[in-house]
Image: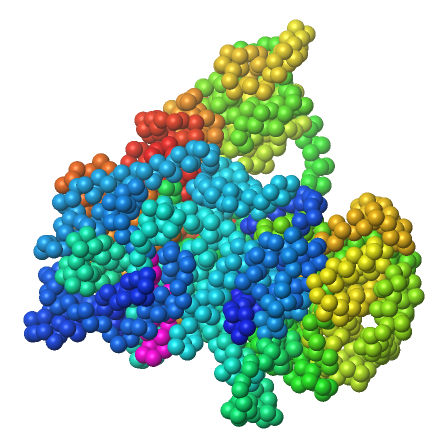
Amino acid sequence: MASTLFQKLFHKRAASSPALHWSDAEPCWPECSFDGSQIRLIIYQECERRGFQPLFDSSTVRFSQKENGNILVEGDAEVVKGLGCSPQKLSSLPTEFVPKHQCAQSVRVGSDVKMLGEMMFGNVAMSFKGSTLKIHQIRSPPQLLLSKVFTLNTGGSTSLSGSSSSSLLTESFECTSSGLTSSHSFPFLNTNALLQERTRGFLSFSCGRKCSSVQALQADSLGLVRSASFFAAQSSPLDMPSRSGREDGDSGIARFASLTSLKVGSPSSSLPNIGSFNRRFIRSQNMSLNSALISKRSTEENFFTSDGSCGANPSRIRQKRIAIGIIFSLSESQEEGRKFEEFFFSHFLLIEGHLNCLRAAVEQAILNCRKIRVPVQCSHMHLQKIMDSLYQFRCSITDLYVQPRLAQPAWLAMSSTCSHKSQICLHLLQSLNATSELSHNQFLPALLSAVLTHHLAWVSTVMPSGHVPFSNFTQKHSSQALDMLARSHPYNPLWAQLGDLYGCLGCPFKMARVVVIGSQQNVVQQVLYALSYFIRCSEVNENKLELQGPGLLDPEDYCSNIITSFEPGEVEQSEYVVVTLQRHLESCHQHLALHKRRTNAKLQTGLESKLADSLHFSSACGCTDDRTTGWDTLSSSGSDANSLSIKSSSLPTEASIKQMAHDLGDVSAEAKREKTTVPQRSFRALCDQGEEASAVYQSFLESGEVSRSSLPNHQIDKLSLTEAISVKHRNSPQGSRKVKFLIGCSLSPDSDMESHTQRLEETLRPLSFKVDANGYRSTVQQERNEYDENLCTTDKAKTESCNMIRRLPSFAGGNSLFDEYFDDYDNFETKTFHNIPIEQCCCEEVKPVPVGTTGLEVPQCAAVPTDGSEACFEQTVKNTNTCTSSDPHLNQRTLEPVNAPKLSLEEERSLDMEIPRNESSDSALGDSDGEEGVSCRNRRHVSPQQVELPLPRCNIVEAHSSNNLSSFGKSMFGGFCPRYVPDLVLQGIPSDVGLQERLLEDLNHAVQHPVLEEPVAEAVCVLADSERWTVQLMSSQRRGLDTQRLTKDVLVSSLVSHILHSTLQLWKLGLPADFCVMHLEDQLQEIFRKSQMLAEYLKGNERVRVKELGAVLGIEASDLPLLTAVASTHSPHVAQILL
Amino acid sequence: MNAIVALCHFCELHGPRTLFCTQALHSPYPTSMQRPHSMSSSIALDSDTLCGVGNGLGARCEEGLVLQSEGDVDKGLQMRQTASKGIVPQASDMCEGCQSLPAGHCGFVSRDTESGIVYVSQQLPTRPELCEMLRQGCVRSLSCEVYEEHVGPVFFGDEQHGYVLTHTFYIRDGLARGLRRLYSLLMLMADRTFLVSCWPFLLARLRCLIEELQTRANAVFEAEQAEVGQRALRMNSAFAPGAARSLSSLTQHHDLWAAMHTSFTWLLKACASRLTERCLEGAPTEDAIVKMEKQLEREEEARLRAHSLADDGEHVAEGNKFESTTPGDSTKTLTSLSEGHEQMLPSCPLPGEGSWGPSEGGFQSLRHLRQVLGPAWFRVVAWHVLLGNQVIWRGENEALIRSAFVLLETLLPSGCVRTIPYSKMYQDAYRCNFLGIESRVALPPHITASELYVLVDIRTRRTAEACCLGAGMEKENVSWDNRDTKSRNERALLWRSCEFTVSWGCPGIPEHGPMVLNKLEAALENESLSTAVVERCLICLKEEWMNKVKVLFKFTKVEQRSREDTHRLLGLLGAQDDANVRLLKFWVTGLSKAYRSHLLTASRATANS
């Protein structure tokens, strides 16, 4: 048996050995054609009086060169060739060509310069002097213009010395320029130790700052630190005096933060992946409109000092604004153009990073010109420098776009497809095995140690999940907490993905990348493939979305299978839009349940089941029949929209509600409860300056709940409507002035009013009749033709389904409010008792009371501003009366028998609490007394509710990742590239000539212009040489390095070494590849566990006794860097201790 | 998506105005966190300066303002600030063209119950900061960023005012200057990279919307032109721009704003869910799975227990028979010093020592247990625990025994733990590896003859003196609270009343215990390590060895390899010596059923393929 298995395995292995090449066949990165010459740079300067003036146009530079002579043309051609991904001039910049540009400067500018300048600066001067970013899409010729306008600090670099970062920036670019004038590629880093010193100083400064803030805030997590400092920054400018008494959004977040800190504190927290969860949540918070801008400003000042905000400084009066624009000429072929656009917009994080770099270079060049008092246009040096940085920019973008990518990054492939899994495992082990056999030494363990230490995204993939899905448990599964987070607090998944890839997870943030060097392509690719399993990231899919429900104006444009909108109605100009409400139905289900629980109302089972049936039914029809009526426009004869909406000043008071209740006598307890509680709730929610998003949000939530809670009220006796109205008219205890506006009251001088009322009566009568007869369909169609065919034709059961389908109120119609109400009533019970009564009537019906009793407060208010608003006022009153008259009765009628006896104790209590107030106001109804006026004044703040519309449904038709341009997942894993590409997380290159200098510059750049918009403490690059079999680490932080060496050796973690060994040995013992990979994952989890242990250890011990760790906890000194890095992802205090 | 979508208009009379905007309101809490319910109730009902729910109307209502023109973007902010002072906007600032919702209309709301996001549409956002940002975006989109009739998409913005993606377009209007009006759709965000990444998607949608508007407007325009040809009219007479018309009348769309709300809401929702991220997290631990499986089994057992009750009665009688039997020859007895204190305070909850401590009196931690038993005996007990022998504790004090079991159980993967904490009679080893029995129960002879058990006898000194002492101590120190700080001696005092005797069957404990035990002892011995660290350490050890167990299981049970291979494997795992092998063999029984079946089916699948 065993032998046959062996044979099988070996046979299989032999058979599948071509798998090493299998992945190469599948293209991961589309073939892209892009040329450096498609990138054009233009620079403008804004002068105070003369408008803007062009300084530089790269297109003319090249043009003049070509005119000038053979040599230059050659040089230029070569440059262009080099840019266009030709394999020559691979590893270093062909700087020897750069000086040739010197003699080829031209002040001529292109013909489109004026327009471009206008686009970049805008045709109206802005008062804002900060740095702005713009993107224009130019149709013909197809171009993308990416531009940045910033203020030049004409004071020169000396004036910048106050800020460490900008002086560093300045310095570095001075270095760059000096380096470039000489013939070496990047010699400045060798020569300029000063820069290195500065870099170190700056970094330690920033780190120190972070640490101190950590200590000061007693914060537990990095996320918390950031969020906490963000609160600190935010609270002062937003602090409103009236805010004192209550919770605000800030403290809400702060409370969360403290929660998180608690959770983070104990690594055994139930929240899975707390690190990445935190990171994403905080991102979404920082990027929310409500809080982002203030917090960003503060960080911006620290990290982009030259980025504006200098306007505040009076010493810098002489400001010139410079605009740099990058024009990407798109290919004429639409396909190519579309591809580049997709790449451009999804990789904007990276492109902007390069733009910042270019900007800084331009800034420096211009400043230098100022210093030596040469007109910018004439300066050779200036031109040369700019051309050089432009060249770099072109290289970076082109390379990023066209360079080959790893065919199938192992981790992503494994996490996305299940079918190939064992094949991928096999391939991975083969790669690992082959590499370790080739290298014969500690190469692979060292490389893996470095990768696992710096690319920390793997940690969250081995953290045991909190929940246990029973099926398929042995495999990893996607994090539900994060899914929920993404839904409730959308963040940019691309940002999160890129952060994962760069390993920006620990504390402090570090960015890492890996370069594998070697001339043997297959060896390098093996290493790359193996590493692509350990460098992990989330998978970002682009969903094809489909609109379901009322669309953008024409839903047909969005999806083919959706309903037509706006069909002409038979009557007048009425139209309706067809809507489906599946999602809504589901939620209604939930809320129905919720409601049941909450109100403890034991609804009659018949009612329940009926309701449930209706819900099911309607959801079913939502699926089958998309043409169900959602909202429709009523005949809109009198189209004076202004006067016909809910008056904003209408005042809900509990008094009136109560009064209604008493007045009508038989309002059910349920109805009472809702009516009395609703205003209070919204009132509470309203106790808000209106600035705090959370409170606003809360209020919406509240009102939503309330309205939802009234769901079961629909079962009403519809006959009652007209009666109720008339009853109401008789009973309504309103002041004399009000009376004339009452519906049905012939005293009204407003003839419109009369007709309105009549129409109301008319429409109601058939309705009740219809309901009575249960012959919904015919009556409806006769009386009101705008019903949707489908709705009506389905059958009677549909009447129940109507519960869930609402009509949109028509606002333009002369009878808008009533119609809305009516619609909902006759058509959709839900809406009637769900929204209108609660949201509007609670506000509206209340109004007559203060009006009638308290000296016409509201009318006065309404009438004060303009006399012309009288009509408006009248309408308002009318509307409110409509509501007033109808709603309570409806509620009353319906609910009385059903709900009254089922009030829970709580509710009764809540009623009790509210009734006294209501009663007092009730008593005050008849006479206007001052006290009542006061209370009314308070209640008045309950604003009228918005009209609630169903949520349009977003259907995800398919999740497709057909091409990889749209996310970083695959685009960041380079293949075997002819030369170094700056942004790639992983890549292989043939030789390292000039690489280190280039890298160091890149790493410094990464720290100075963090692409993730978060401060980065250190950028590192792992250099794996597959010829010498060495692994080196290069860091932007050059602590503890002698000046001669740019890199340091990597410590081989014994844990990693052990993992590799045991995994490969198992593989050699003939265990299947899947199992070996599973074992590998288990052992990675062990590392995670050990890091937890280390974190725990460090809690109690300020000093690390390595001996003790080794002897007792089994942590060796060589493991410490790895374990501390891992620990810092879940327990940020580790970083504090060890830094 | 945390953004605002807006429709703006360049009014001929009033300049750029925001007509309509939709924003998404998010809960300040992540969904997985519980939203404190106190939030709603803690909002005080305080002042007159309250604002409306989603719009600033409330404040103005208070002052009785009738704001015909909410679209007054220039003054929007100002108005909000001055609203409480009762400044009334001028009627001249309003016109129908720069107004969307009729005065007094409070906008639209849609709720996403699933994610808790609320989408609100109004003419202007509530917060003045947002108003200002939106105003800026509106002005820029309609004037600053418009060049030479260029209509199309533009992205612009800065840190201070947010980032805007806008698309300008013209709507034909026979009565307007140039027979058309300039509008723009814009999306405002703080997260520029997010917004930029949405560009292609967003633009396509905006264009659809624009086309729809334009088509409708064109139809209206044509119809109007058919009636009165404006162009011809104007050629002949001086043109004075007429009253601005609202967009809904230009498009003859009476529910325009409701439709806009829906469209904008959809846009916001779609942009947020267009890209979805899938983050993998690790598989649940074996322990978690086992616990779940046990949970499922428990119901089953509950039914079985009813049946077994009858049997238990017989066992009791049988057990009594062996009560007087003496332990075997090889049994060693050691007496731990103890007198006086019999304190099993079930009433006094202990200070938390991580998850170690039992919630009532008893052993506090493994280290504590080790101190009480003495290192040698602890090692004996732990050795038996780890290798799967039956561990029997005999004594009167149930709580003490239970607390010991709670601690000892942590030495094993939870799949290996079968405990009967306190029983009136002996239970067989296959039923439990942790057994607590009453002190009068004797072990049956076949147990005492075997090597596979360890017995811990607890004898309590029931002298009056001891009780007094114990009681006294109990009072004088709030004894258990600061136990951690107590010295060893003090601690020992607490246990004076208990006398522990450990006896076991096998001839001697091998010096080379399983590696887990050695490491655990080292950790326990090192007093500088806190209990929590020891706990973590134990978890690591268990996990490490469980991983070896998995390999062994796969190798021997699933693949059924030869003895020789297995030996090599054990060498690879570093578990060649006997104790480790025994440990692995025992721990294999602790693997979850799910894991086993997974491996078996997986191997079958590969074998078949």
Residue B502, image x, y percentages: 52, 19
Residue furthest toward the top?
Answer: B465
Taking depth in this image into account, of A987 and B170 the one nearest to the observer is: B170
Taking depth in this image into account, of B128 and A870 the one nearest to the observer is: A870
Q: Decide if residue A447 is in sight here.
A: no
Residue occupying the point 86% across, 72% down: A748
Q: Is residue A139 magenta?
A: yes
Q: Quadrant of residue A1053?
A: top left
Residue occupying the point 42% across, 22% down: B528
Q: Quadrant of residue A720?
A: bottom right
- Which quarter of the figure is the N terminus of chain A placed in? bottom left
Residue A911, image x, y percentages: 82, 48
Residue A86 in the figure: left or right of residue B34? left
**By what rule are the colours in the image chosen?**
rainbow
Residue occupying the point 55% across, 67% down: B18
Magenta region, residue range: A134-150
Taking depth in this image into account, of A473 and A94 the one nearest to the observer is: A94
Residue B257, image x, y percentages: 62, 72
Taking depth in this image into account, of A1036 and A1034 the one nearest to the observer is: A1036
Residue occupying the point 59% across, 10% down: B339
Residue B470 in the figure: left or right of residue A1099? right
Vertical arrangement, residue B584 with respect to residue B496, above or below? below
